[in-house]
Image (cartoon, grey):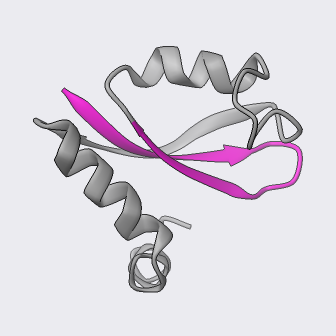
Amino acid sequence: MYYAYILVSLRDGRYYYGSSGNIDKRLIHHNSGKVKSTKNRKPLKLHYSEKYSTRKEAEQRERFFKSIDGYIWLKQKGII
């Protein structure tokens, strides 16, 4: 399984959008400072995730989250 996910920084309240085949391991990488874009925003916690059967689907959903339409959808659903 693959996941599209949203993390929230407990430091600044900002969101990070990503995708991964192992969401637990990926969260550990984020919180250990191994991810350049989030190393100064830790600690992070999982805020939202969706499960997909293929990597391609998860990556497409990640790109959607990062788009203006995705932002509007996430706001309307009360996710962010």
37 or 78: nearer the viewer: 37
Residue 51 within the segment the image draws in magenta: no
Say left or right for 21 vs 25.
Answer: left
| Displayed quadrant of residue 1 | top left
Question: Which quarter of the figure is the C terminus placed in?
Answer: bottom right
Measuring from the top left, give residue 71's x and y in whole percent.
49, 78
Residue 5 within the segment the image draws in magenta: yes
Measuring from the top left, give residue 73's x and y in whole percent.
38, 80
Going 62% across and 16% down the picture, which residue do you hit? 28
| Displayed quadrant of residue 60 | bottom left
Going 43% across and 66% down the picture, which residue do you hit? 65
Going 31% across and 25% down the picture, which residue do you hit? 21
> Does the magenta stretch mainly form a helix, a strand or a loop?
strand
| Displayed quadrant of residue 55 | top left
56 or 11: nearer the viewer: 56
Measuring from the top left, give residue 16's x and y in whole percent.
62, 51
Q: Is residue 67 above or below residue 45?
A: below
Boundaries of the magenta span: 1-19
Measuring from the top left, give residue 75's x and y in whole percent.
50, 79
Going 30% across and 58% down the picture, which residue do you hit? 61
Q: Is residue 57 above or below residue 27?
A: below
